[in-house]
């Protein structure tokens, strides 16, 4: 893989060319900032910025005014190659709280190991209705110890309005949901995004997560996406590397709460990262 070329493609298509992620969401390009504004239960944040040191503080203040004016908590996704080099420090000074550093990993679908199957007694089921969404939310809350109400509403919205743009799956051991994940499939985008992969504690380390990655990769290939993209935790990174993913850069979520201090459930849960901030091995 040509790392520089793929990172350039990712920046152009998925950040500068970001698309709304569901009903009620929209993307704006304001100067050197690309921001995504969603409903209260959706994801709100800065997708990309290309700032000069002299303009950075004003741009930060403008985004704070925009999102807090809507009563939204929001996230500024800061990548390792973003400028200025002290942007993270500026965000903290403006009231943002940094989350765990994640690794942007990319895999060319044609080169990934897609033969990983779930362990005996476990089956992977696509989510197509409210009952399936409830199973995904149940896993999310048990695996991450976090409220899944925002995720539940987001998946309901997406499956009702544009089912081809999201692919959620749940792994069942008998009738028990033990792992779940989703995939974002923007039409025409070269990258499909893997998000929110989580496994309940007593099923970790048995290969269920690998099977969910392989399943979603096969779906992405069938839909014509050339690459898969993951914001990986330190726990999921070695699993993804064994499947053929390559690290490109880092990404850190900087979160700014609303004036009321409200916290909205995050939809941008990285593969293996708990919303509460703790990380557990898959």
Image: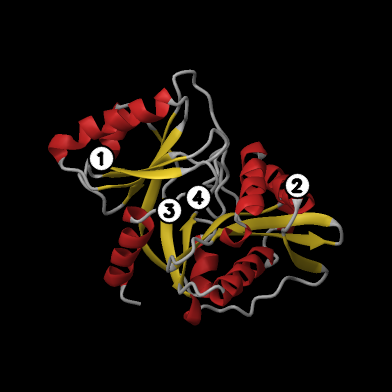
Judging from the image, what secondary structure is the residue with disc 1 in? helix
* Relative side of 140 to 132, left or right: left
Mark 4 vs mark 2, CA separation in Å: 20 Å
Graded by Cα atoms within 10 Å as few (under 14), some (14 to 19) or many (20 or more), the crowding at tag 3 reads some
Judging by the rendered image, the residue that carries numbered circle 4 is 21
What is the spatial separation of the Cα atoms under label 2 and label 3, in whole angstroms?
26 Å
The mark closer to the camera, 2 or 3, is 3
Furthest toward the right, the residue is: 174
Q: Secondary structure at mark 3?
A: loop
Instruction: Read off the residue under disc 2.
Output: 134
Q: Is residue 42 above or below residue 182?
A: above
Q: Earlier in the sequence, mark 2 or mark 3?
A: 3
User: How far is disc 3 from disc 1 in space, using C-alphas?
Assistant: 24 Å
From this view, report whether residue 255 is shown above or below residue 106: above
For this view, does 59 lie left or right of residue 165? left
Secondary structure under tag 4 reads loop
Gap in Å between the C-alphas at discs 2 and 1?
Answer: 39 Å
**On residue 87, which mark appears?**
1
Q: Is residue 44 visible?
A: yes
């Amino acid at each position: 893989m040509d790392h520089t070329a793929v990172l350039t493609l990712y920046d152009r298509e998925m950040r500068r060319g970001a698309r709304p992620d569901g009903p009620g969401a929209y993307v704006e390009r304001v100067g050197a900032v690309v921001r995504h504004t969603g409903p209260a239960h959706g994801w709100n944040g800065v997708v990309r910025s290309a700032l000069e040191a002299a303009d950075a503080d004003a741009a930060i203040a403008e985004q704070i005014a925009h999102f807090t004016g809507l009563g939204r908590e929001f996230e500024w996704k800061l990548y390792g190659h973003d400028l200025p080099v002290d942007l993270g420090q500026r965000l903290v000074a403006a009231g943002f709280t940094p989350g765990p550093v994640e690794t942007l990993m990319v895999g060319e679908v044609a080169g990934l190991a897609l033969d990983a199957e779930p362990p005996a007694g476990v089956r992977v089921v696509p989510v197509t209705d409210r009952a399936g969404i409830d199973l995904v939310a149940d896993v999310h809350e048990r695996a991450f110890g976090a409220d899944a109400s925002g995720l539940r509403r987001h998946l309901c919205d997406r499956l009702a309005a544009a089912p081809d743009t999201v692919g959620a799956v749940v792994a069942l051991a008998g009738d028990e949901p033990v792992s779940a994940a989703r995939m974002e499939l923007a039409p025409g985008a070269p990258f499909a995004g893997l998000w929110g992969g989580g496994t309940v504690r007593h099923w970790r380390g048995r290969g269920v997560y690998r099977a969910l990655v392989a399943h979603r990769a096969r779906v992405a290939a069938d839909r014509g996406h050339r690459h898969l993209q993951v914001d990986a935790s330190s726990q999921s990174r070695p699993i993804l590397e064994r499947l053929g993913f390559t690290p490109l850069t880092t990404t850190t979520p900087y979160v700014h709460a609303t004036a009321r201090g409200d916290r909205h459930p995050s939809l941008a849960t990285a593969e293996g990262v708990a919303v509460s901030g703790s990380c557990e091995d898959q």
